[in-house]
Image (cartoon, grey):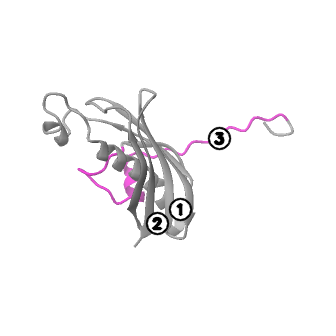
Amino acid sequence: MDSDGIVEVKKMNYLDINGIKEIIPHRDPFLFIDYIEDYQAGEYAIGYKVVSKQADFFAGHFPQEPVMPGVLTIEALAQVGAVAILSVPENKGKIAYFAGINKCKFKGKVSPGDKIKLETKIIRQKGPVGVGEAVASVAGKVVASAELMFMVGP
């Protein structure tokens, strides 16, 4: 609320799959975001992935109890972070490469049919190198978190 008592409503920036593809270079079968609910260029992005029962990785991980590999959950978080970084005008057409993963924790599993909420906030950036704080959750329960380091390149 401002000094005049007016409540400011924040407009959300939504991206469908086509909007995502305009920003990041990932494509099937390695695109792990269905849509972006909200983002602010250079600051954060919040996306979602509905995990298909037909995903190829479930055939071998694990046939008796299908679980999405944790590293793919981290990749999905990185892709959401890439939307935030690559939506900055000077980064248009570039690639955000993984530079490191710190403080990674897996706290739950992702199963077929789950809808993963993917949140990545850019906490530091100097030149082309930066760090994102990332959290993945299913039905309000954190399933993975990490600090993701990136480097923006051509």
Verify whether residue 7 appears in magenta: yes
Q: Amino acid at mark 1?
A: Val
Element marked by disc 1: loop
Task: Name the residue that disc number 1 marks.
Answer: 88
Image marks 2 and 3: residues in contact by CB distance under 8 Å? no
Q: Give how far apart the Cα atoms at labels 2 and 3 are.
A: 25 Å
Element marked by disc 3: loop
Q: Is residue 31 left or right of residue 87?
A: left
- For label 3, the crowd category at 10 Å Cα-Cα, with few meaning under 14, some 14 to 19 and many 20 or more, is few
Residue 30 position, x and y percent, is 27, 51
Q: Give how far apart the Cα atoms at labels 1 and 3 are.
A: 19 Å
- For label 1, the crowd category at 10 Å Cα-Cα, with few meaning under 14, some 14 to 19 and many 20 or more, is some
**Picture layout, residue 97 above or below residue 49:** below
Q: Is residue 81 left or right of residue 30?
A: right
The answer to which of marks 2 and 3 sits earlier in the sequence is: 3
**Residue at image point 31% right, 33% down:** 110
Write down the region rendered in magenta: 5-33
Q: Amino acid at mark 3?
A: Lys
Element marked by disc 2: loop
Task: From the image, give the main secondary structure of the stretch colored magenta.
Answer: loop
- For label 2, the crowd category at 10 Å Cα-Cα, with few meaning under 14, some 14 to 19 and many 20 or more, is some
Image marks 1 and 2: residues in contact by CB distance under 8 Å? yes
Verify whether residue 94 appears in magenta: no
Res. 125 visible in picture = yes
Residue 121 position, x and y percent, is 53, 49
**Picture layout, residue 50 above or below residue 81:** above
Q: Give how far apart the Cα atoms at labels 1 and 2 are.
A: 7 Å
Task: Name the residue that disc number 3 marks.
Answer: 10
Q: Residue furthest bottom?
A: 154
**Residue at image point 50% right, 57% down:** 131
Image marks 1 and 3: residues in contact by CB distance under 8 Å? no
